[in-house]
Image: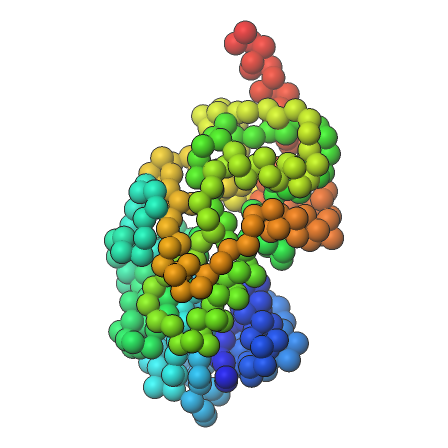
Amino acid sequence: MDILILGGTQWLGRELAREALRRGHDVTCLARGETGEVAPGARLVIGDRSQPEAYDAVLDREWDAVIDVTRQPGFARRAAEALAPHARHWTFISSGNVYARHDEPGADESAELLPPLESDDSTPESYGEAKSAIEQAYREALDDRLLVIRPGLIGGPGDASGRSGYWVARAARDGEPMLVPDIPDAAAQLIDVRDLVTWTLDAVERRLTGAFNAVGDRSTFGAYLALARAVGGHDRDVRLASPEWLVDHGVAEWSGPDSLPLWIVDPTWAAFQDRSNAAARAEGFVPRPLVETLTDLLGWEREQGLERPRGAGLGAERERELVERLDESATLAG
């Protein structure tokens, strides 16, 4: 197949290009070329998608498949106008953030979506509305040629955000007491980037259409943590802290510096990591065992350095300070 990837220089786009090349497809990546390199063997076409002429260089052929991962509605609206007549099949990697509610365990693709963002430019706060707007733009332009994939938390080797690898890396870092949010029964759901890429390209090759949740099997934070500790070799003390205590002491949720990943405070987001993957499974999606993802993640994390500054998680000194405060709080309460 002749595949055009809109992007292709960052983690997911590059992995999609690499796997497509491995399967023998011809791959072209349209990107500014400023955030990274394309996969070896892919052709890079330099283009700034904020400009009307960005797509001129790729209008010279009929594309068997176009894949887009953008979060900017303006990029998608311009791409749809320019490229829809030249694409036999189109895949948009959307997000589970497009859903209007995140408090219904096991919700499927029929759940209500957020209203589409009217602006061409998204912000972190409007991410879900932006992805919803992009889905709308592509549905209107492509109709029965469109595949929409809505991943949840994507993890695995190469996850520079630090979210999916934090707990297994922390388990392997040292045997000191581990600070953990006291949410053992909270939902946890991760899709390995390699499974997402494999199933996406399987679907592209079949010209599958429709919308699908691409999420791992439903689990709990307690089970995820136990497996991460077993893989990382941490068998010492765990210090459980309530969500309220963590908030009061400046620990961020979900991601980012000074955070504890995979933890969400807001109860209305309790099922964000608890969506149904039944539709994708019915179309051949098979998530690998979580232990395999965590084992491979740990190998990658070791290569990056377990003591390095992280995009998500707590550093050793900050965690030690918080554990001491937690112990002091327990002593005073006792």
Using the rendered view, name the quadrant where residue 323 is placed: top right
Let me know if residue 253 appears in the view.
no
Q: Is residue 167 left or right of residue 4?
A: right
Please give left or right for residue 102 compared with residue 112 in the image.
right
Residue 77 is situated, as x and y percent measured from the top left of the image, at: 34, 73
* Number of on-image labels: 0
Q: Is residue 107 left or right of residue 61?
A: left
Residue name at image x 40 percent, y 76 percent = 207
> Quick check: can you spot residue 278?
yes
**Which residue appears at 29% of the width and 67% of the height?**
136
x then y, percent, for residue 320? 67, 27
Residue at figure coordinates x 29%, y 71% from the top left: 139
> From what the image shows, is residue 325 above or below residue 128?
above
Asked if residue 313 lies left or right of residue 124, the reply is right
Q: Is residue 306 above or below residue 316?
A: below
Point 36% across, 35% down: residue: 267
Instruction: Give the camera-side residue of 140 and 236.
Output: 236
Rendered view: 234 above or below 159: above
Name the colouring of the figure. Answer: rainbow
Q: Is residue 257 above or below residue 41?
A: above
Check the image and name the residue furthest to the bottom. Answer: 60
The quadrant of the image that shows the C terminus is top right
The image position of residue 50, as x and y in percent, is 43, 73
Direction top: furthest residue: 334
State the image quarter where residue 26 is shown. bottom right
- Image coordinates of residue 299 in percent, x first then y, are 71, 51
Q: Residue 211 is drawn in which quadrant?
A: bottom left
